[in-house]
C-alpha cells in the first residue's frame, strides 16, 4: 500500500517536471521564432529601402514592447546602417534576444541567447523613397 502511494507521488512529480520543461521549451521556441521573423523583416525592409530606416527602428521598438522585452538587452546588427546600398547588394540582419530560463526558485536562473538571421537583396533605386536612414538604437 505504501509502495503504491510512493509510486503515485513520484509519477505526479515526474509529470509536473516534464510539464514544466515543456512549458519552458515552448516559450523559448516561440521567442526564437518571433526573433527570426523580426530579423527577416529587418532584412526585407533594408532590401526595399536600401538601408536601415527610422521605420525599421520603430518596428524594433514595437517588437520589444509587444514581447515585453528590454530594448537595451537586444542586439541588432544590420549590414546597411546609416544609408542606402545599391541595387543588387545582399543585405542582412541579425537580432539576438536573451531568453531567461527560470522555474520559480527550483532552478538557478540563467540566460540563453536566441539569435535570428535575415537576408534579402536590395532593390533600392535612388530617389524612389523619401526615408530617413539611421543606425540600430
Image (spheres, rainbow, N blue to C red):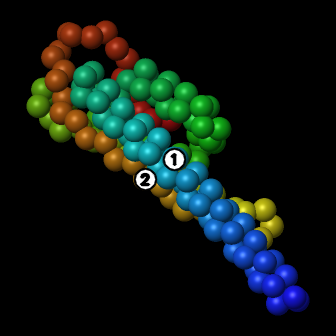
| Crowding at mark 2 (Cα within 10 Å: few <14, some 14-19, many 20+) | some
CA distance for labels 1 and 2: 12 Å
Secondary structure type for disc 1 = helix
Q: Earlier in the sequence, mark 1 or mark 2?
A: 1
Q: Are marks 1 and 2 in contact (CB under 8 Å)?
A: no
Residue drawn at the location 51% of the way across and 47% of the way down:
30
- The residue tagged 2 is 115
Q: Give above or below for 19 relative to 53.
A: below
Residue drawn at the location 41% of the way across and 33% of the way down:
135
Q: Is residue 98 visible?
A: no
Quarter-wise, where is residue 99 in the image? bottom right
| Crowding at mark 1 (Cα within 10 Å: few <14, some 14-19, many 20+) | few
Question: Percent x, y for residue 112?
Answer: 54, 62
Residue drawn at the location 42% of the way across and 37% of the way down:
38
Report whether 137 appears left or right of 104. Answer: left
Question: Percent x, y for residue 36?
Answer: 40, 44
Report whether 131 appears left or right of 24. Answer: left
Question: Percent x, y for residue 51?
Answer: 29, 28
The front one of 63 and 7 is 7
Residue drawn at the location 47% of the way across and 41% of the way down:
34
Q: Is residue 37 visible?
A: yes
Q: Give above or below for 4 relative to 131.
A: below
Question: Percent x, y for residue 116?
Answer: 39, 48
- The residue tagged 1 is 30
- The single residue placed furthest to the front in the displayed view is 1
Amino acid at each position: 500500500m505504501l509502495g503504491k502511494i510512493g509510486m503515485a507521488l513520484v509519477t505526479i512529480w515526474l509529470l509536473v517536471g516534464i510539464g514544466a520543461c515543456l512549458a519552458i521549451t515552448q516559450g523559448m521556441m516561440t521567442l526564437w521564432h518571433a526573433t527570426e521573423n523580426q530579423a527577416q523583416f529587418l532584412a526585407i525592409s533594408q532590401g526595399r529601402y536600401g538601408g536601415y530606416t527610422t521605420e525599421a527602428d520603430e518596428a524594433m521598438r514595437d517588437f520589444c514592447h509587444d514581447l515585453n522585452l528590454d530594448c537595451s538587452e537586444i542586439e541588432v546588427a544590420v549590414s546597411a546602417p546609416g544609408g542606402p546600398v545599391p541595387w543588387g547588394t545582399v543585405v542582412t540582419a541579425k537580432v539576438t534576444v536573451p531568453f531567461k530560463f527560470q522555474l520559480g526558485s527550483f532552478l538557478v536562473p540563467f540566460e540563453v541567447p536566441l539569435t535570428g538571421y535575415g537576408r534579402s537583396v536590395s532593390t533600392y533605386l535612388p530617389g524612389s523613397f523619401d526615408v530617413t536612414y539611421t543606425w540600430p538604437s
